[in-house]
Image (tube, helix red, strand yellow):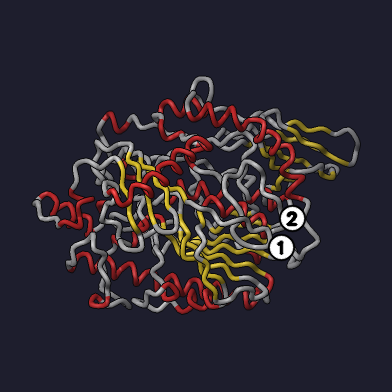
Amino acid sequence: MNSFEKTTQNQTLKYTFAFLCAFVLCSASYSQEQYNILWLSVEDMSPRLGCYGDTTVPTPNIDKLAMEGVRYTNAYATYGVCAPSRHTLITGMYPTSTGAMAMRTWKRTSSLAEITDPELLSIPVYEATPPAGVKCFSEYMRAAGYYCTNNSKTDYQFKLPITAWDESSKNAHWRNRPSKKTPFFAVFNNTETHESKIFEQYSPRIAKLENIKVPSYYQDTPTVRADLVRHYDNIHSMDKWVGRIMEQLKEDKLLDKTIIVFFSDHGDGFPRAKRWVYDSGIKVPLIIRWPDGKDAGTINNDLVSFVDFAPTTLSFANLSPPEYMEGQIFAGKQKERPRKFIYAFRDRMDPAPETIRAVRDNQFEYVRNYRPDLPYLGYIPYRDNAQMMKEIWKLKNEGRLVENQWQFSADKKPLEELYDTKLDPDQIHNLASDPEYFTKLNELREAHYEFVEKFGDLGMISEKELIKKLWKPDGIQPITNKPVLHTDDAKMLEISCATEGASIAFSWQGDDNWSLYHKPIQIKKNKTIEVIAIRLGWKQSDMVKMKM
């Protein structure tokens, strides 16, 4: 039995039950006060901030947030790249459980669009398809009365369902909610620190070349320092954005009514960081500021994974996370026992095939290379736009890479890797063959096997096989069934859909937005209602219209 079938067999009943009960569970809040929740998400940035001990550029607004909140030192993305990690954030599931592993699945990147090789062009396009009943977790918050907005990046590995947000656009804002008394969950995404911004050539604005600390897996050259300087300049600019949003909260008298969560979607957008499973690619800053000043200025060293964000955020809203979620609650009144391990992954990146798995505890990281025949540096044209990467390729071709750059120069990979991140934070000294560390190696290896046994791993089959598993029986994307409207009396309207796990959205004539259907709604006489159903990973249904 393969991993997909095992996952499906073991969890079908759980997912079905979760679908039937989720909205009931999530609508039933405790008598506690409902706090607003704000996510401030930035891109491609490791913890290069003053509050984390890096004073290369001033980051006063984020540092102030840390002084007023809790700073987490061991927070990790599931992937060292955005789309699979954002899939984890929105679903509360590992991409290896849902078919969301590759970067990307549902559309071709610009680098893929430029390829003429027939084999590479055969890479399929598909949507990650979680089991029936899995939702964007924001739906549960909408059902509980929260006004949910996203401004504005999604990149969830499936097309954005119209049920996910009250508004998802560059204009989305908590200020657009229907009433000031309505609690909100607002997400703001900043792109200033994205990898692509390092490609832009300009003179340093804030950071100074001589103040840059160069990681030991790079050579200290003017090109490397220039790219690092640009990244730091962008971090300084991003910090001002954080300040502007905090000022808006203050203007609206919401600072003491809002839980604020600041984080990056994965590590730095540099070679041997972004897309990689080492700390440079997956370790992120995470700060949580509580409205009542709880634990202000403290440091939390617990291991936190992106798979924990969805259940934890639901708990902030006094909601019970659905059983299918694979993470745990790491903060707040419902906090669970800290996790022992976090898990990280790497699969196809643009056209470059790969299968790497990693397990990390508080000190050691274990890496299992399932494609040791491949070099670490695959064919990723987009990444190669960076001047630093162009230089690395030049040095590699000329045989001038140094010892600490063995991960760049290697034509093949070892089967296993083990790093002591306290003694070797740059993770260049592989301890897997050192007898002194065999006990730790075996412990983390077994943790990896136990993870696969528990959750399965869809990354172990080809993408062509995967599509046939996700979209049974023929690998063609299914279409969600049309919703059915029931009007047994003249006052209330009930809507159902025969597709298991589908969400339903409706809009009355004259409305600008789609509402989430989660309970019977009052009929508006002589008004036309439009209704659509959608299951994640499937095509949405045809629209049904009815004049009431």
Camera sees residue 61 = yes
Residue 524 shows in the view: no
Question: Which amino acid type is shown beneath numbered disc 1?
Answer: Pro
- Of 346 and 484, nearer the camera is 346
Residue 508 in the image: state x and y as whole percent.
75, 45
* Residue occupied by mark 1: 183
Asked if the residues shown at circle 2 and circle 1 are in contact, with their CB atoms under 8 angstroms apart, the answer is yes
Judged left or right of residue 219, residue 469 is: right
- Please give the name of the residue rendered at 65% of the width and 63% of the height, measured from the top-left corner: 332
Q: Earlier in the sequence, mark 2 or mark 1?
A: 2
Kindly identify which residue carries mark 2.
145
Residue in the picture at 65% in, 37% down:
133
Query: Nearest the camera: 47 or 412?
Result: 412
- For badge 2, the amino acid type reads Gly
Count of numbered circles on the image: 2
At 48% across and 30% down in the image, what residue appears?
Answer: 3
